[in-house]
Image (spheres, rainbow, N blue to C red):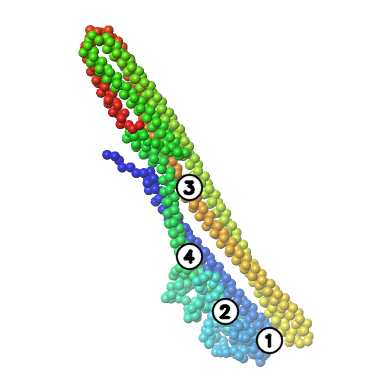
């Protein structure tokens, strides 16, 4: 029963295609996972940067108001108005600051309350009010705890002790609405889809929120809103690190100079939306890549294996006795060399079989002649001497024929030996090819290592650019300080102008100087603004550079992955060449067997030549033995008949081959 065989190309594809599919999908999965992690990290960093800027904006706004309030306080303390002049003084600053629409007010320890004429505030019990108690704890005006005033508004009081030199303790203050803070909290978020809210940690009251109905309410860990409950737990535990709460990435930032905490959050679904789209795109690209790789592998394998398939068909035909085949040896590789040697073997076998066939025909003719001579000798003993002489001549010709067979067998042995030498050379060439493919694999691994170095250098470049961005933020803070100094100078010039106006003619020169100082402060403020704008443009350019460097890093990683695929391909080529080397070694073993057979045939032919010589000597003796001619002729007849049968058998064997 013939064993069922499979094509080498089918076996190769059976192993290669699953490996390629698994490798591509593994790379796509890893890339999607890394992208998801990196996108989450970048979103967290952006959220933290955004909330830091918001906190800085709130702090700057609060400081700006405090500077104004303290300037008014110092002015009032310098003028030290009488009790009747307090209200007119407060009226002069009413409506000057939009953040405190009710203006300034003054409370005393004996229960008196002063406010601007147009203010709608009501004092109630002054000494028991929260703003009065908070003001007693500081000389310089500062912010207290947020509370709801009589008008139902959530406000914070900026209060401080008013020093007029009397024994009666007075507190000067102004209520600041949270409208501006709400604008900063709700509109200054840098990330699309992100939101923020502001919490006072004294009583966990929400000071600003996108949902107006939540403003003034208190955070609680038992809140039905999981986000608010999680934020309350973190704030109460003083854990202000960024974390995931109820499917949202949440960042916290304490507002310097206050007891407030700014909370900013963004749903993870918004962050991962682009990652999901990219993952789908990667899987689509991976599927297309797998299809293209399979097609390319199929074409390459079939193209490489096609000559070997043709040679296999030729060898199968040879095993069936068909030597009329034409072997394709046009390929310039080891398979082409194999085809060339098989073609030479076919030609040698054709010549050998043709020679054997010719000699077999000659042997058949000679055996027929011997048979006829023996019969003649048997019928006519008188002509025995002549018949024996003819037999002697016939045996002589037989010896020549056997010698020819021996020579042809020797030639066959030489041809097989030469074929074995060529096969050994092919084996050596295949071994050199294995070594070259191994070196090519090592070179590709060195290229992969070099790509890793380039990726590391690119990452160091990104870090350097980020450090430049950090330095620009420091410069921005310095410019902010300059702007604050300019604002304070402007306020001082305003106060100086007021004092000069009150001094009349004597203060006119002082008013001119104050005006010039105000212009100088305005110019400084504008210059600081221009510098801030330039630094902001630099920060944007730095951000673009970071994005481009990250894109370059992704391309380098992608090229590293492609080099890894090339290394795997070299491994497959190295494995295929080793398999071909094993086949060539098997062929060399078979040729060795053929060489052994041809050597045995040559030895047998030489023995037959020696036997023929002995037969020739025997026939000469038989000429001399005339007395035994009848019996000898009968023996010769029997021998010639057997020789004829042997010749026919040899002829039938040769006829099985097609030449």
First along the sequence among labels 4 and 1? 1
Image position, residue 509 (x, y; %): 78, 82
Q: Which residue is at 69% across, 85% downward?
A: 79
What residue is disc 4 on?
274
Rendered position, 128 above or below 309: below
Indicate left or right for 370 with 267 as reference: left
Q: Are marks 3 and 2 in contact (CB under 8 Å)?
A: no
What residue is disc 2 on?
180
Please give the label number shown on residue 329.
none
Q: Nearer the viewer, mark 3 or mark 1?
A: 3
Marks 2 and 4 sit apart, C-alpha to C-alpha, by 34 Å
Rendered position, 284 above or below 534: above
First along the sequence among labels 3 and 2? 2
Q: Secondary structure at mark 3?
A: helix
Q: Nearer the viewer, mark 4 or mark 1?
A: 4
Q: Quadrant of residue 66?
A: bottom right
Which of these two is toward me, 298 or 457?
298
First along the sequence among labels 3 and 1? 1
Q: Which residue is at 70% across, 73% downward?
A: 524
Q: Which residue is at 78% across, 87% downward?
A: 505
Residue 502 visible, this orientation: yes
Please give the label number shown on residue 80.
1
Q: Quadrant of the C terminus?
A: top left
Marks 2 and 1 sit apart, C-alpha to C-alpha, by 32 Å
Rendered position, 89 above or below 365: below
Q: Quadrant of residue 489?
A: bottom right
Marks 4 and 1 sit apart, C-alpha to C-alpha, by 64 Å
Rendered position, 473 above or below 443: below
Please give the label number shown on residue 567.
3
Q: Are marks 3 and 1 in contact (CB under 8 Å)?
A: no
């Amino acid at each position: 029963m013939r064993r069922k065989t499979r094509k080498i190309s089918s076996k190769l594809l059976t192993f290669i295609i699953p490996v390629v599919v698994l490798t591509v999908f593994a790379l796509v999965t890893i890339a999607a996972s890394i992208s998801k992690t990196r996108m989450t990290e970048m979103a967290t960093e952006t959220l933290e940067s955004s909330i830091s800027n918001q906190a800085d904006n709130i702090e700057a706004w609060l400081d700006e108001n405090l500077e104004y309030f303290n300037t008014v306080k110092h002015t009032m303390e310098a003028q030290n108005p009488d009790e009747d002049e307090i209200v007119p003084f407060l009226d002069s600053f009413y409506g000057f600051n939009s953040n405190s629409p009710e203006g300034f007010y003054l409370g005393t320890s004996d229960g008196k309350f002063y406010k601007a004429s147009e203010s709608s505030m009501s004092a109630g019990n002054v000494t028991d009010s929260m703003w009065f108690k908070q003001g007693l704890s500081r000389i310089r005006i500062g912010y207290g705890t947020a509370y709801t005033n009589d008008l139902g508004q959530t406000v914070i009081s900026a209060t401080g002790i008013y020093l007029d030199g009397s024994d009666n303790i007075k507190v000067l203050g102004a209520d600041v609405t949270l409208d501006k803070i709400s604008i900063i909290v709700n509109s200054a978020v840098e990330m699309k889809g992100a939101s923020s809210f502001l919490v006072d940690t004294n009583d966990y009251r929400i000071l600003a929120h996108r949902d107006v109905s939540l403003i003034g309410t208190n955070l609680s860990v038992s809140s039905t809103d999981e986000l608010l409950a999680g934020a309350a737990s973190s704030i109460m535990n003083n854990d202000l690190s960024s974390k995931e709460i109820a499917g949202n990435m949440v960042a916290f930032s304490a507002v310097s100079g206050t007891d407030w905490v700014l909370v900013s959050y963004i749903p993870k679904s918004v962050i991962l939306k682009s990652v999901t789209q990219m993952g789908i795109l990667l899987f689509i690209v991976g599927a297309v890549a797998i299809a293209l790789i399979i097609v390319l592998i199929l074409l390459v394998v079939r193209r490489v294996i096609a000559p070997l398939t043709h040679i296999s068909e030729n060898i199968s035909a040879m095993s069936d006795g068909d030597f009329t085949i034409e072997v394709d040896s046009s390929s310039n590789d080891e398979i082409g060399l194999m085809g060339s040697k098989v073609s030479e073997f076919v030609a040698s076998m054709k010549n050998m079989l043709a020679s054997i066939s010719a000699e077999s025909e000659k042997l058949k003719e000679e055996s027929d002649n011997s048979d006829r001579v023996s019969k003649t000798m048997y019928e006519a003993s008188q002509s025995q001497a002549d018949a024996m002489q003819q037999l002697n001549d016939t045996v002589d010709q037989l010896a020549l024929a056997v010698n020819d067979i021996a020579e042809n067998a020797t030639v066959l042995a030489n041809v097989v030996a030469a074929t074995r030498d060529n096969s050994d050379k092919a084996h050596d060439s295949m071994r050199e090819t294995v070594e070259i493919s191994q070196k090519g694999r090592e070179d590709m691994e060195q290229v992969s290592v070099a790509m890793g170095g380039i990726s590391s250098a690119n990452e160091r470049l990104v870090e350097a650019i980020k450090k430049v961005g950090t330095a620009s933020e420091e410069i921005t803070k310095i410019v902010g300080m300059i702007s604050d100094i300019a604002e304070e100078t402007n306020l001082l010039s305003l106060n100086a102008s007021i004092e000069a106006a009150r001094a009349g003619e004597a203060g006119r020169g002082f008013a001119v100087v104050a005006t010039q100082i105000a212009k100088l402060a305005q110019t400084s403020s504008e210059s600081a603004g221009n510098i801030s704008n330039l630094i902001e443009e630099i920060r944007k350019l730095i951000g673009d550079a970071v994005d481009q460097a990250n894109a370059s890093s992704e391309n380098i990683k992608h090229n590293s992955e492609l080099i890894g695929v090339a290394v795997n391909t070299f491994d497959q080529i190295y494995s295929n060449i080793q398999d071909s080397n094993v086949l060539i070694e098997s062929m060399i073993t078979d040729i060795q067997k053929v060489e052994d057979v041809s050597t045995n045939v040559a030895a047998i032919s030489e023995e037959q030549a020696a036997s023929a010589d002995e037969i020739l000597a025997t026939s000469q003796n038989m000429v001399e033995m005339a007395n035994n001619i009848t019996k000898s002729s009968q023996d010769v007849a029997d021998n010639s008949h057997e020789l004829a049968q042997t010749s026919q058998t040899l002829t039938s064997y040769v006829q099985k081959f097609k030449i």
